[in-house]
Each structure stands twice: as structure tokens, then as C-alpha cells.
Image (cartoon, rainbow, N blue to C red):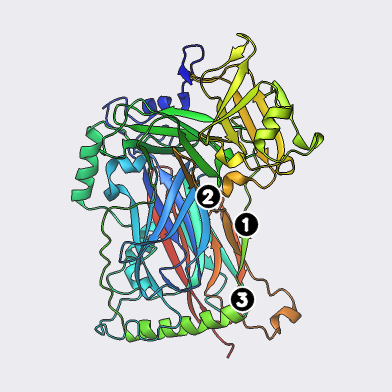
Amino acid sequence: MKKSIVILVILFSIVSSENLVFSQSSGALMNESVLIQTDKDLYISGENLFFSFMTLGSVGNSQLPISNFAYLVLRNNNNLNIVEAGLKLVNKKAYGTFIIPDTLSSGVYQLVGFTRMMRNFGEEAFFAKELIVVNRFDRSFGTQQSLVYASPLDERLKSQVSTSSEIVTITPSKSTFGPREKIKINLRFSGNELCEYVSVSASVREQVPGGITSSLEFPSPSNEIVNKIAEKSRENKCVFFPEINGVIVSGIVKDSKTGNPLPGVDIFLSVPDTFSNLLHSESNSKGEFQFLLNDYYENKTLYFTIRNIENAALILDDKFSLSSVFSPSEPFFSKDLRDFIVKSQSISTVQKAFPSQEIIDHKAEAKTAFRNEFYGLTDFTVRPVDYLSLVNFAEISKEILPGVRLRNKENFYTVNIFDRNSSKYYEESPAFFIDGVLVNKIDNLLPLNSEQITKIEYFTTERYIGQISFPGVLSVFTRDKIIAQTNNYPGQTRVQNISYLQRSGLNSISFDSGEKISSPKPDFRQTLYWNPELKITLGTNHSLEFYASDNIGTYEVVVSGITSQGIRFSTTQLININLPK
């Protein structure tokens, strides 16, 4: 392998991002912000958590492109990540659901949302909110707390309702509904503000423990945090570019003995597939490198390979790692709240036996992602099964691979490719690929016989990627995909790429027939309706219809969102479900 100036590839999509993240007027680094809404604030372990996620650009710079990928973390009071989810944003929004693990202990948890760009400003810039999770078998949670009554949620929201009613008015067809009765809600959006983001939920009214911020309240950062973010903005240091055109995977290369960064190291990236694929990056003066990945690499195992450099240790950036310490609030529990928790635990147990909540996936339009194939047509393609059976790769290379020379010197195997232009063998080894992945050695190929290898492709001429040239290429594809069955090859690191959370919503239960209404199957849903992406037109009415469950009590219909000017609003309306008198 040698450097050449024959071909030069510029990662334009990454480099050009630098021009997009600085204010043209002040030269300051432009920050993004995130808003997350959840269907509830208190969950029983094993329940579904529904969320909506939105990114906001810098105020006064709404035309600047912002991140199209984001990250969500749920962590406990020991700073252990319980849920890690990648999100694909469409028109700055994402929504979905995940299950609160059934084995979680009772306590206060933190939901954190951020983009890669926001990491330039420190974790103070991240969105964070607290949630209460109660294990459904834990009957003692909150019993040791002081009996301090938490104000009813509707009382705490009065100021927000009066302000938000200028944007949206919620009018139910009546105040009280019977079990399994159709509920009709009218929404009237008024004013001159265009709403970019509106979500609607209808769930049982919770009494949020004192000290915990409600999902209907929009937490504002303290002046200290605002000043820290502003100071970092003025530093004009963009370490983490926004992920606009794809996902950025980054890391650092260090000397494993001294710990010093290694500049100028060539790092190659490939994934298992039916064709050989390759990306290339070079570490900078600080040992840092990065790759821009499209949808083709989603949920695939990534193989990073460093060739011919001893003691090179590759350390990948963990996007979900949070260094700040989560110090949860001390919630205060009232007797009514404890009764609500016990009732919710019982309902969760019934729902486990008779599930009535149906999750529906909102599949995105399938797109064909560009595949970074290292080559097209090959000089030679050989299928060993077309020949007499051969017992190992040494026999295969000798008998049916013209121009490939395999040598064994004291149990150290080398391969050389015959250069048809110079009519002699290259002195350096070719690029080795096993099942589409670049490797440094072929030792795992040596025992394979003709039946275990599906095909062999190779070149007898130099091949290039960017400024790097390889003296030939040898690609071997195996029947049992041995690349995934072996430990890392020398100079290789593998990691599972992020799997992005599927957009999903809640399918409303329908009791539109007498048979369904009289069904003995219990329905104790506490979330009746959830629409994270309501399409609205100002000055018009929007009608919502959904059905009550068998769970008697008071419910909240909540409409929240953001206007095009960045004004956040939230309006709530109470309705009751009760047995007919």
C-alpha cells in the first residue's frame, strides 16, 4: 500500500458543514435546542412510553440547516443508561415509543435528548426531564416519604392554560363520558402564529410528585447555564459537526503503549456484505478521525481496520455517554398519589394479561442508499464448486487462481498478486477482503475447502481509494460468513452501528359495535389518545374522536406545541369517565 496523488476524494458533506454552523453576523457558533414531550410523567415498569421529539434552530436563524439525527437516553440515579435510542428527524421532528423495562426498580429517572451539534456546548445544553418509574410489584414506593400533598396538575397549569388559550381552545362535546363511549373533542386554533409542531394526548390525570417537573411544563435553563452556552458559542470551536447529510462516526487513534495520539494514520471502514466495500479516513494532528455514513450502514456491524501499524489503538466516540452526574429531585408523595400508584400497578398487571394497547409502526418511505463498492467488474471471478473439490485454500490458490501466489515461511503465510503490466509479482501484499470486509491477514481462510467458499474475486492491477493504492485485491466470500464468527483480526475493531428507533404511534381502540361494547375483555387503558404530529391549519377547527376505557376517573386532554417564532404553548382540558347514573 502506498500514497498516491492520482485520485483525491474530499468528504465535502462533512467539511462544508463548517460553513453552516457559524453566524454570518457575529461569527459565533450556532447552537440547536431540543424539546421532548411524553404522554405521561409517571410510568409503571413494563408500560410503553410515548414521546415526541423536535429540534429547534438558533433564534433568528431559522433558515440555517439543522441536524437530521438525534439521540435519546433514559438513565437512572446511578447514571446508568437504561434506554439508548437513535432518532431520524423528518422536518425537524421524530416520535415513537419504547417499553419501560419490566425489571426497573422504583425511582426517579432522567430522559435526555440531544443532537451531535449540541455536544459542542456541553451537556448543560441538552434537554433533560425527570420521570417517575414504579416497579409494578413494589408496594412500598413512596410510603417512607413525608405526607406532603402535591398540588393537582390542573391547578399548576392555570397560568399556562390562560396564555395558551390564545393559540388553541379545547372543547369536548360534554364533560362526562361513560366507559367505552365515543369521546369527541373540538380544537380551535386561532391567532396569527403558524404552528410548526403540535401534539395531542388524552391520558389519566396524574398528580405529579412535588419537586418533579410535569411533561406539560417547559423547563427553562438557569441564567448560569445560559451564560455557559453563550460563552462556548463565542469560542467558535466546532468539534462536533451537525449530522445533516448522514451519521458521523468518529474516534481517535492512540499509541497503546504511551497513550499519545497518532496523526496521519489511515483508517478503513467496511461492513459484511456480498460485495467488497470500503471507506477511508486519516487521523489529524490530534489523532482524530471521522466517517460520514448514509442509510446503507444503519444497524450493520462496522469493521474498522488499521494496516501495518503496531501498537495503534482505535477508540470510538460513544454518542450516548453522559459525563454529567444526574442528581434526581426528592419527590414528595401525597396519600392520593400513593393510591393512584397502587391503582396503576393493578391496572398494569391486568393489561399484561389482557393487552388492549396496540402500537402501530409508521414506516418511512424506503430509499435506496448509495453503496460504497470498492470495485465494479473484476479481473477474475472464480467459483470453487465449478472445479474439482480442493481441501484447503492453499490448494485452491495453487490450482485455480492464476496470478495469486501463496507462500508459507515458518507458518507465516504471505500472498502476492501478479502485476500483468510489469509481468512480475507485487512485493507488497494486496488488499484482503473476507465477506466484504477488509482484513490484515488471511489465516482464517487457510482451512477452507471448495464447498465452504462461494466465490473469489481478484485484481491483478493497482486499485485506489482516495490517495491510497493497493497492489491488487483478493476478495473471498464464504458460505457461512466466517467474518462474523471470528474474533477481531489484528489491527481491527468492530462495533454495532446505531439502530434508529422506528416511528410508531398508538392505535386507538374502537368500540363501534354492540358486540365490542359488551365484550368481557377488560380495557383499562390510561392513555386513550396520542397524536405526536397533528396537522393543523390556523383559523380552522379540528375534530378528534376516540373511545373511553373501563378505567373510571379524570383524564386530561393536552394540546402542546411550538409556533414558527419559537413560542411554546400547552393547553389542557379535563374530562371525566364515570359509570352512568
Q: Secondary structure at mark 2?
A: loop
The tag earlier along the polypeptide, 2 or 3, is 3
Q: Kindly identify which residue carries mark 3.
A: 355
**Viewer-proximal residue among 458 and 137:** 458
Left of 216 or right of it: where is 354?
A: right
Q: Kindly identify which residue carries mark 1.
A: 361
Q: Secondary structure at mark 1?
A: strand
**Viewer-proximal residue among 125 and 243:** 243
Q: Secondary structure at mark 3?
A: loop
* On-image quarter of the C terminus: bottom right
Q: Looking at the image, can residue 244 be seen? A: no
CA gap between label 2 and label 3 equals 26 Å
Left of 438 or right of it: where is 129?
A: left
Q: Looking at the image, can residue 46 be seen? A: yes
CA gap between label 1 and label 3 equals 17 Å
The tag earlier along the polypeptide, 1 or 3, is 3
Q: Kindly identify which residue carries mark 2.
A: 500
Left of 47 or right of it: where is 476?
A: right
Query: Where residue 55 sits: x, y (%)?
Result: 42, 45
Query: Where residue 568 sits: x, y (%)?
Result: 38, 52
Query: Where residue 475 sits: x, y (%)?
Result: 63, 31
Q: Quadrant of residue 520?
A: bottom right
